[in-house]
Amino acid sequence: MAMICFVPPAPLSLEGNLLENWKRFRSDLEIFLKAAGFTETKTTVGRPMAILLNLIGEKGKELYNTFQFEEGKSKIFEEVLMKFEEYVSPQKNLIVSSFRFNSRKQKEQETFDDFVTELRKLVKDYDYGALVDRLLLDRIVQGVQDSQLREKDLQEKEVTLDRAIELERTTALSREQAAKMKLLEVDRIVNRKQPKKTKEKVGNYNKKR
């Protein structure tokens, strides 16, 4: 019976885009391990770990030797993978994230709900903790395009995030209904002013010329 040979992944490259290099190496490594019959690796300290260090290359092993582990975890396959993940993952620039959030304003033609959704996405990039709702409220009040809504929010004694969102949705619905009523009124006036078309008298086709 012929022996099946599995193609091992190329060594991890620490040049260029580290994150993409690592994703490619890890994907190829997982495929290789599954093909070789290793399905459980989370607490494995034996062959999968040895295979990882054997395939990752010299630069990868040098990097591995710089990692700090809790006692007894330096040979656990999943723990080692996590250390590499931490190393290659780009660090969040908290100053940039904070600036993007605090300078975000509602754009032209952007609905209020879309504006709030984008703010929620931005706030995830910064560790605001328990202040999230308060900061979202402040950003909504400062960044919303409707100045009348802003005044309503400012006049509320104890406005909350949910209350501010409710006010905007109610205001938007009222504006939409008012616009529809105005269009209906315009159509009614236009139709009333249009002169009725007189029916054309059709002569007898057989009428003598």
Image: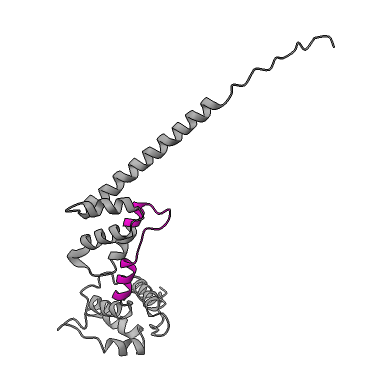
Depth order, front residue of 69/76: 69
Horizontal placement of 131 versus 20: left or right?
A: left
Whether residue 34 is situated above or below residue 66 in the rendered picture: above
Q: Is residue 48 visible?
A: no
Question: Which residue range is magenta in the image?
Answer: 94-116
Q: Nearer the viewer, residue 90 or 40?
A: 90
Residue 20, by quadrant, is bottom left
Q: Position of residue 159 (x, y in %)?
A: 20, 53
The answer to if 76 sits in the magenta stretch is no
Residue 192 visible (yes or no): yes
**Which image quadrant is residue 51 in?**
bottom left
Quadrant where the N terminus lies? bottom left
Residue 47, above or below 156:
below
For residue 62, above or below residue 43: below
Q: Looking at the picture, how far across and down is residue 131, in whole percent?
A: 19, 64
Q: Residue at x 18, y 81 (%)?
A: 73
Residue 72 lies, in percent from the top left, at: 15, 83
The residue that appears at 49% across and 31% down in the rendered structure is 187
| Residue extending furthest toward the right | 209
Residue beneath the point at 31% across and 84% down? 53
Magenta span: predominant SS is helix
Report if residue 98 lies within the magenta region: yes
